[in-house]
Amino acid sequence: MAKNILVIGEHADSEITATTAELIGQSTRLAEGGLVSVALLGSSAADATQQAFEAGAGKVFVNDDDGYTEYNSDQWVAAIESTLESIDVILVAQSTVGRDLAPRLAARQGTAAAMDCVDVRSDNGEIRVTRPCYGGNALADYSFATSPVIATVRAKAFEALPLQSGASGEVIELPAPSESRTTIEGREVAEAEGLAITDAPIVVSGGRGLGGPEGFEDVENLAAAFGSNRAAVGASRAACDLGWYPVSQQVGLTGKVVTPDLYVAIAISGASQHMAGCSGSKMIIAINRDPEANIFQNAKYGIVGDYKAVLPALIEAVKAQS
């Protein structure tokens, strides 16, 4: 059965984000002949419209008013609600915006929002989603009793379609920002060097078992051995709470969700809150001196030992392969 799907898009530097392109691609697969629309808000949104069409959208709702540039829940919800006539499914990235916007929109529409999904599919015409539960140690499938279906989706859950150069579609202007009860007092952007942790194919993370901030020097050295264009450094919440590493690099339920090809967990116990942020990794390698650490239950390969003894040899081995 044909479905009309809306992707609430995000963009930067006049281009849609990779996750938005992935959601458009999957929406095209799910629509079964229905219309895939994209909503783009904020400065330079209009510049990203063409790329949305090339990614597979048939219609784009857009307003590049500077008033939308800083996310404001009242204004964004009002704008998105104006697009929902005949919409069956709403998809948005599991991002800072998506985590706030999806449940608010669901409450206004009298429906439910499935958060942090790793799969959205059609099962005999019924939309079903899969999301982690029990701290990432299990996956649960959900169907919906209400409409529209609303889901936030992890980055890299799907593959984007090949871009269709020169594709076009209908453009509809969204209303100007509405009055808001919320005011934004300021915004602090965390500066990070090198590859973004959510984009890196390899993530090397350290935990409280490092014993202090100096332990992250070894973690950084291993990441550097893989290559600055391939690897990024992460940290557990415990390490960040102690001030050993920037909060912007925190992996876990209250930090970043990463889905790299390789995740190396060094001196991390593997608490459910941390695993919720890295369970989507294709391969996990754990290094911990506690043979009973939970991280080994989630790792494909494990090394029991003091990281100070293990890492020098591992770094040399990685360098030899590079």
Image (cartoon, rainbow, N blue to C red):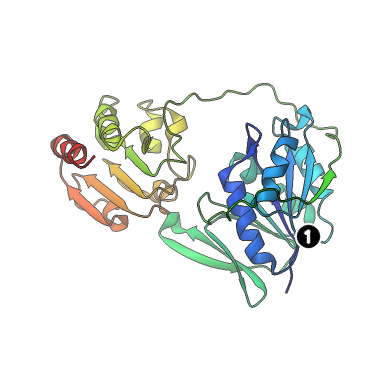
Q: In this view, does 9 lie above or below 225?
A: below
Would residue 277 appear left or right of 48 to someone viewing this image?
left
Report which quarter residue 128 is drawn in.
Answer: bottom right
Q: Is 148 in front, or is 23?
A: 23
Q: Is 286 in front, or is 103?
A: 286
Residue 7 in sight here: yes
Q: Is mark 1 on a helix, strand or loop?
A: loop
x and y percent of residue 111 in the render? Answer: 73, 60
- Which residue occupies 75% across, 55% down? 58
> In the rendered view of the protein, which quadrant contains the N terminus?
bottom right
Please, what is the three-letter code of the amino acid marked with disc 1? Ile
Q: Mark 1 points at which residue?
A: 87
Would residue 194 appear left or right of 11 to someone viewing this image?
left
- Which residue occupies 75% across, 37% down? 46
x and y percent of residue 36 in the render? Answer: 72, 58
Would residue 161 appear left or right of 183 to someone viewing this image?
left
